Image (spheres, rainbow, N blue to C red):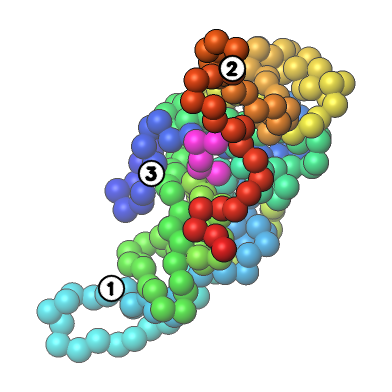
């Protein structure tokens, strides 16, 4: 089940979310009826779940206490025990996201809105989600009020991801990180999936295969081609008036290649 967290930043219900994936991950989604939540420290960014140097220390004592002792705690245990599932927030498809996260011509993007996303979780796990905030880790800090907060901050160089991240924490163990790569959280597929978008310029047989597989799970009618596959238009059209034996009364020339306004 989904639950908002008061210290996080969930997107509006009508925010459009995309999850770009290769074909094998799409088959796994259909077969398991579940989203895969990965260990953050296996996502490839060594800063996942870390604090920026500018983050102030957390006040864990009575603020009226006469004196304080600074204690340092390594939070990597929590990072290793957390599980995350990542989505791209955008009204439109992203050519860059296709290249980064889906195989060329053989990828899939699941499109949904945040309201559907929240309602789709049907298991017993408590899931929360938030927009990720992007900071200059050299100069900017963030309020560190609980262990979840660092997992929703990333360096500004990742800002192109425009990520909405779902979080699930299976358990907290004193033994250190759970070595498994992640876990599955059950979802209602028809509720989650608004559209199944086939990769740009995919061949017809691949689109047919995606549709055939999706039909087995009751969502075949949601398969559509990528908008990036549309054929470009190079034919300019002109409305030309006819007056007497001239094309139009105020004889105006058709556009030509010439100087740009303000050019030399």
Residue that extends furthest to the left in the rendered view of this protein: 64
Q: Which of disc 1 and disc 2 is earlier in sequence?
A: 1
User: Which element type, helix, strand or loop, lies under badge 2?
Assistant: loop
**Under tag 1, what secondary structure?**
loop
Q: Which residue is mark 2?
A: 246
The one of 85 and 125 positioned closer to us in this rendering: 85
**Location of residue 222 by image quarter:** top right
Q: Mark 1 or 3, which is nearer the eye?
A: 3
- Does the segment drawn in magenta span residue 257? no
- Name the one closer to the observer, 35 or 19: 19
Secondary element at tag 3: loop
Verify CB contact (< 8 Å) between mark 2 and mark 1: no
Looking at the image, which residue is at 39% across and 41% down? Answer: 11
| Tag shown at residue 10 | 3
Instruction: State the count of labels.
Output: 3
Q: CA distance from mark 1 to mark 3?
A: 26 Å
Vertical side of 252 occupied by 8: above or below: below
Disc 1 designates what residue? 60
């Amino acid at each position: 089940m989904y639950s908002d967290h008061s210290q996080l930043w969930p997107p509006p219900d009508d925010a459009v979310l995309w999850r770009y994936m290769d074909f094998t991950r799409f088959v796994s989604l259909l077969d398991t009826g579940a989203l895969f939540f990965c260990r953050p420290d296996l996502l490839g960014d060594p800063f996942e779940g870390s604090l920026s140097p500018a983050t102030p220390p957390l006040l864990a004592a009575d603020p009226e206490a006469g004196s304080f002792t600074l204690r340092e705690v390594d939070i990597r245990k929590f990072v290793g025990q957390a599980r995350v599932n990542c989505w791209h927030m955008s009204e439109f498809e992203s050519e860059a996201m296709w290249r980064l996260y889906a195989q060329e011509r053989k990828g899939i993007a699941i499109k949904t809105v945040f309201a559907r996303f929240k309602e789709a979780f049907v298991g017993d796990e408590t899931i929360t989600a938030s927009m990720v905030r992007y900071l200059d880790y050299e100069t900017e800090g963030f309020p560190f009020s609980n262990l979840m907060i660092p997992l929703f901050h990333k360096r500004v160089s990742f800002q192109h991801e425009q990520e909405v991240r779902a979080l699930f924490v299976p358990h907290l163990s004193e033994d250190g990180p759970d070595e498994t790569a992640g876990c599955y959280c059950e979802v209602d597929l028809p509720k989650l999936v608004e559209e199944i978008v086939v990769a740009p310029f995919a061949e017809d047989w691949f689109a047919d295969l995606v549709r055939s597989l999706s039909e087995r799970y009751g969502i075949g009618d949601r398969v559509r081609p990528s908008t990036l596959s549309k054929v470009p238009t190079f034919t300019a059209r002109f409305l030309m008036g006819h007056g007497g034996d001239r094309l139009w009364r105020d004889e105006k020339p058709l556009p030509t290649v010439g100087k740009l306004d303000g050019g030399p």
